[in-house]
Image (cartoon, coloured by chain):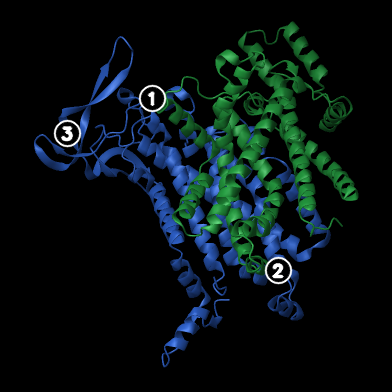
Chain colours: A blue, B green
Amino acid sequence: MSSIVETPPDEREETLVEENTTTATYSQRQLIWRRFKKHRAGVIGGCVVIFLYICVFLGEFLSPHDPAHRYYDYVHLPAQRIHIFSQDGIHWPFVYGIKKSFDLQTGVKTYTEDASVRYPIYPFARGAQYTFYGLFTTDIHLFGTGKDNPMFLLGTDRFGRDMLSRIIAGGRISLTIGLLAVFISLTLGSTLGVISGYYGGNIDNIIQRIIELIFAFPSIPILMALSAILPPEWPSHLVFMGIVTVLALVGWGGLAREIRGKTLSIRESDFVLAARVAGARDRRIIFRHLLPSMFSHIIVIATLAIPGFILGESTLSFLGLGIKPPMTSWGLLLSDAMNIHSLSLYPWLLIPGVCIIIAVLAFNFLGDGLRDAADPYSSR
Amino acid sequence: MTNYIIRRLLHMIPTLILISMVSFVVIQAPPGDMLTSRLAELAEQGELGSESAMAQIGALRERYGLNDPIYVQYIHWIWKIVSKGDFGQSFTYEMDVMELLAERLGLTLTLTLSTLIFTWIVAIPIGIYSATRQYSIGDYGFTFLGFIGLATPNFLLALVIMFIQVAVFEAESVGGLLSPEYIGAAWTWAKFIDLLKHIWVPIIVIGTGSTAGIIRIMRGNLLDILGQQHIQTGRAKGLKEGKVIVKYGVRIAINPLVSRLGLELPNLLSGAVVTGIVLGLPTAGPIFLTALTSQDMYLAGAFLLLAATFLLIGNLLADILLAWLDPRIRYE
């Protein structure tokens, strides 16, 4: 397809206006890119998605603490503020030390800033040791105040674990699950969708009935029931794979339907007929002609499906049927805020929810932008 | 029309059979059965291995038919449901499943349907507003809110609203459907008012996502239709703008929404389950979660089966409504 070179319609108009200029020609890929760049929300969404994945890829390097380390002295510490000014003047950005006081009468613990101690935040500071994807072991973090010095920019949870580090660790799981689930359900969905649309008849009927059966159940309850099947004694990495499978099993139907519709619309087009006349077998037509020509649409469908998987995973984990410790995810982090008591006293436990919203929004905008760009020959 | 309805009803039967099989398999699939937890309980009390305990377990196994092959168990299960409406016993609550679920399921469905009405009442006027004032500040505002609404999972919205109630309005009782003093009390006017004071929270939580979706579709549909020729004809005839929009535009733009009812209902029901759990409502949601975690198979299976049946009926009603509303649809 990329060998097709055509003058884009808007370019033609320009050349009509400005005569004597050489006509520019663009490949389809360039056309898609040009159209995508015009969709501002899509570009912003794309940047946010890339940023999020870089963040969770760098994981341990970005997070100032070991997400599993419990600072029992700083349980439920509110977010600390970064200061530049003190009574003594301007400094390198720093956080104050923490003074803990305990009201014997009410039993309420309060934390106040200890103005006598300053911990400057240095880039590439040393902290907890970690192994970066099994490649090398180091204790250098992007920023920090040195090992075991308090710096909890988003507060701590009920075991005194650093929220920022946990949100990064949770994001790694939440965002990976979205990608893996979409990959599996897309493989399943596009294969079955193309077969269903290309062959029609009985095969089509059976596949459509199966999809109808999946859609007959409300999604969250059936997800809950399927995740409850996972044996409780499974370690957390197996549960992780299990949840991905469950999400994909419930989620492929919608993708298959869209791809079936697309197949139906191009099944009779000239290039497919030409291939058939040239004696190509069904398998060749499906894998060399139909699927590649739908590739850009498949990417769009996939991008728009990821938010659903992220939301599904977070709901399951929130309800205690999803990811289990020591792994964590945004949904699981939010389950700490489930009771109204901790919610009102420790509102910073809701921050992972902000991450979910940002990630879902970014994927939705990116998908919208890609959808506009996927068909660069249509006029808007 | 009657023909069409009868045909659709007949079509539902194989689907229902498949649904019941899936419900049964899903609930049977966990390793062990509900007696496993009872065994663990006995082991804790140090009574495991004692003759009386084993006899007790054996008797229970026999009574619940746990020794039979799975298809026999399935046939027993479905036969009792079809012939007597008996969904079996809940093991954890030691009650009839139907007795346990009836009121809660009723509340869940009431909540779902009220939310459905709420979303339409809110979303359609906003959709019309957005379409007739395209690219105005209000349009952008609603579009933005709509995106946020679609991106926020139900449970998070429930948490945020609870937080606002406590932190901003200093509410004393949060969550639930009734204040503590009215629970179990006879229905009075005061109790009804109290219910209204509570029920808006779950309705907003469940409905926000759908509302956002409907606004988006309504806006798009109406914009498409307002560009068509019959609208121009209406205006050329000198009809009032309001009449053109409502009778010539909205009348057609609503049809695709009716056909989407079938897609909307499962989402709302899912939302009602999650929201019920987070807000601690006396709906089927919390019971379903407990049933799943304690492997109370008859209870969980009954809920799945009833929920899917409800959706099937909802779908059918939506299709009939659409056929009735839109004369272009043929029921061949």
Tag on residue A265? 2
Left or right of A127: which side holds A179?
A: right
Report the amino acid beneath label 3.
Arg
**Of residues B250 and B297, which is closer to you in this image?**
B250
Q: Is residue B167 visible?
A: yes
Question: Which callout, 2 or 3, points to the residue nearer the camera?
Answer: 2
Q: Earlier in the sequence, mark 2 or mark 1?
A: 2
Report the amino acid beneath label 2.
Ser
The answer as to whether the residues below labels 2 and 1 share one chain is: yes
Q: Is residue A177 visible?
A: no
Mark 3 burial class by Cα count in 10 Å: few <14, some 14-19, many 20+: some
- Which quarter of the rendered picture does the C terminus of chain B lie within? bottom right
Left or right of A77: which side holds A183?
A: right
Report the amino acid beneath label 1.
Leu
Asked which secondary structure carries label 2, the reply is helix
Q: From the top left corner, tell me how far across and down residue A372 is, in percent.
A: 53, 65
Left or right of A62: which side holds A114?
A: left
Q: Which residue is mark 1?
A: A345
Chain of the residue under the numbered disc 3 shown in the image: A
Above or below — where is A69 with respect to A341? below
Where is residue B253, by image quadrant? Answer: bottom right
The answer as to whether the residues below labels 1 and 3 share one chain is: yes
Label 1 to label 3: alpha-carbon separation: 27 Å
Tag on residue A122? none
